[in-house]
Image (cartoon, coloured by chain):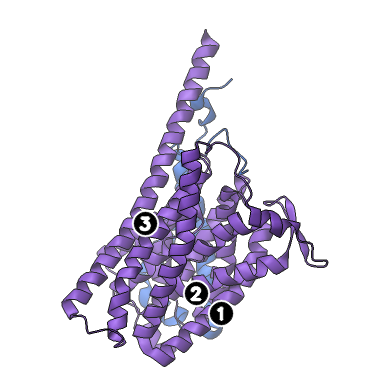
Chain colours: A purple, B blue
């Protein structure tokens, strides 16, 4: 961890431009989070760093905006009957352990291989996990769309059926989102992996949500809403840990929160208008685009470590800028899909009410 | 059966304005006392409670404001689907 006094003196000056930028990115990140349960952090952390915020302060401040945002989002979505608090808390606690372990690994890698080694590890984790999980989620959403059964209730996967059928005495817990009893020996590793990913790439939900859908058998809407509970539990513990080392810049966290609470309310409302497979579409699209963004940076870090021939400073700068632009595009596209789906859903509902009213008058 | 407009009629304007004023006050206090806040909030140790408590306070006030804000604008959840399943 950074020296406390040094960290505090590293807190940047905030001007109107910075404030607006953080507020807007917070809004878009919140919108996506409200809808798919996570997201935004992968843009916010590098976004803050681009303003001159040191890496650890950016991670800490992002986490300190995440838990209050997730709290507001989960309360909102609980009103729609989409949250499984028990599942969220059970996975959230094991995710907390995953965060601590993931942060420990990060520190070890940084000590042994320096910043470039740490960045390479993060980027490779991004690319591999997002390629496998994101590809799978997007393929599943595409298959649902092609089959024309987007309106039907989601089918529980074979894997989830098997997980729900395994009975390990003394470890079984009933979860309402699954409408089944599942051994916590299955939920603990899933939570741990979610936490590890959160500590590594800041978005644990890219593992958490697909795990709840495909491994445990939760419906998409409930999985994405329950992820907000996990994010709250994980974010609260993580923020406290960072705050104890004086790394949270509360101004940054609250300004981002200012925008993200507008967004998360809107994203949560959006879930009530869309078909469940849209959660998978938005999540899959973002994951696959972000994967390309991080993939672009892999050669830069490889070159810094001397594993491949040297890349020129100009080329590295172009790759870095392109990578960041692609990430912003991923988040923006996710937000666009959410808003469009919501708009269409609202319009259809209004038309239906208008038709019903006209029929009544006849 | 009531119309769509009737179903979305009640607007919590008063509470939105009230929470909006409090939220604005919190942000003004935060941004006009940056040096003082930075000095205390980044001390570490038990001072960690300061940023955490601040985050809860802002989420409560500003979260309430943003919720009412969208309701007043007429952006509300679907009247048909209440269940996630």
Q: Quadrant of residue A342?
A: top left
User: Nearest the camera: A78 or B84?
Assistant: B84
* In the rendered image, residues at marks 1 and 2 fall on the same chain: yes
Does residue A245 appear anywhere in the picture?
A: no
Residue B53, position as x, y percentages in the image: 54, 70
User: Quick check: can you spot residue A135?
Assistant: yes
The chain that hosts pointer 1 is: A
Q: Residue A154: x and y, percent?
A: 59, 44
The residue beneath circle 1 is A100
List x then y, in percent, for residue B62.
Answer: 47, 56
**Is disc 1 in contact with disc 2, using a CB cutoff of under 8 Å?**
yes
Parent chain of label 3: A
Q: Earlier in the sequence, mark 1 or mark 3?
A: 1
What kind of element bears circle 1?
helix
Considering depth in this image, is A325 or A44 the residue closer to the camera?
A325
The answer to which of A226 and A23 lies nearer the viewer is A226
Q: Secondary structure at mark 3?
A: helix
Horizontal relation, residue A80 to residue A310: left or right = right
Mark 1 vs mark 2: which is more N-terminal? Answer: 1
Secondary element at image label 2: helix
Do the residues marked 2 and 3 share a common chain? yes
Q: In the displayed structure, does residue B35 sit left or right of residue A34? A: left
Instruction: Judge left or right: residue A161 versus residue A304.
Output: right
Please tell me whether residue B2 is drawn above or below residue A192 in the rendered image: above
Q: Position of residue A295 (x, y in %)?
A: 34, 69
Disc 1 and disc 3 in contact, CB within 8 angstroms: no
Q: Which mark is residue A331?
A: 3
Give the Cα distance between marks 1 and 3: 27 Å
The label shown at residue A199 is: 2
């Amino acid at each position: 961890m950074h020296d406390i006094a040094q960290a505090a003196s590293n807190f940047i000056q905030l001007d109107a431009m910075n404030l607006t930028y953080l507020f807007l990115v917070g809004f878009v990140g919140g919108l996506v989070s409200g809808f798919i349960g996570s997201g935004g952090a992968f843009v916010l952390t590098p976004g803050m760093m681009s303003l001159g915020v040191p890496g650890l302060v950016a991670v800490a401040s992002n986490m300190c905006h995440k838990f209050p945002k997730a709290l507001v989002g989960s309360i909102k979505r609980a009103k729609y009957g989409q949250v499984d608090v028990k599942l969220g808390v059970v996975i959230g606690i094991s995710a907390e352990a995953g965060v601590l372990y993931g942060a420990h690994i990060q520190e070890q890698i940084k000590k042994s291989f320096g910043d470039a080694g740490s960045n390479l590890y993060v980027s490779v984790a991004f690319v591999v996990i997002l390629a496998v999980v994101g590809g799978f989620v997007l393929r599943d959403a595409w298959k649902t769309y092609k089959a024309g059964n987007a309106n039907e209730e989601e089918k529980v996967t074979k894997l989830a059926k098997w997980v729900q059928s395994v009975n390990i005495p003394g470890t079984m817990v009933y979860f309402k989102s699954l409408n089944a009893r599942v051994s916590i020996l299955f939920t603990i590793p899933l939570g741990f992996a979610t936490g590890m990913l959160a500590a590594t790439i800041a978005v644990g939900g890219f593992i958490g949500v697909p795990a709840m859908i495909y491994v445990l058998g939760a419906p998409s809407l409930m999985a994405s809403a329950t992820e907000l509970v996990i994010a709250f539990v994980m974010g609260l513990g993580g923020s406290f840990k960072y705050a104890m080392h004086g790394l949270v810049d509360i101004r940054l966290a609250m300004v981002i929160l200012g925008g993200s609470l507008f967004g998360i309310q809107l994203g949560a409302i959006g879930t009530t208008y869309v078909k469940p497979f849209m959660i998978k579409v938005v999540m899959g699209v973002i994951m696959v685009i972000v994967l390309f963004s991080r993939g672009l940076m892999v050669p830069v870090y490889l070159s810094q470590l001397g594993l491949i021939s040297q890349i020129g400073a100009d080329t590295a700068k172009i790759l870095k800028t392109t990578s960041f632009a692609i990430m912003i595009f991923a988040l923006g596209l996710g937000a666009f899909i959410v808003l469009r789906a919501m708009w269409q859903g609202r319009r259809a509902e209004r038309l239906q009410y208008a038709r019903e009213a006209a029929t009544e008058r006849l | 059966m009531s119309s769509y407009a009737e179903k979305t009629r009640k607007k919590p304007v008063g509470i939105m304005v009230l929470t909006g004023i409090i939220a604005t006050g919190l942000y003004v206090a935060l941004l006009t006392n940056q040096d003082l806040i930075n000095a205390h909030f980044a001390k570490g140790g038990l001072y960690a409670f300061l940023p955490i408590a601040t985050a809860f306070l802002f989420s409560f006030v500003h979260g309430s404001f943003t919720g009412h804000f969208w309701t007043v604008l007429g952006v509300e959840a679907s009247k048909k689907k209440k269940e996630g399943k």
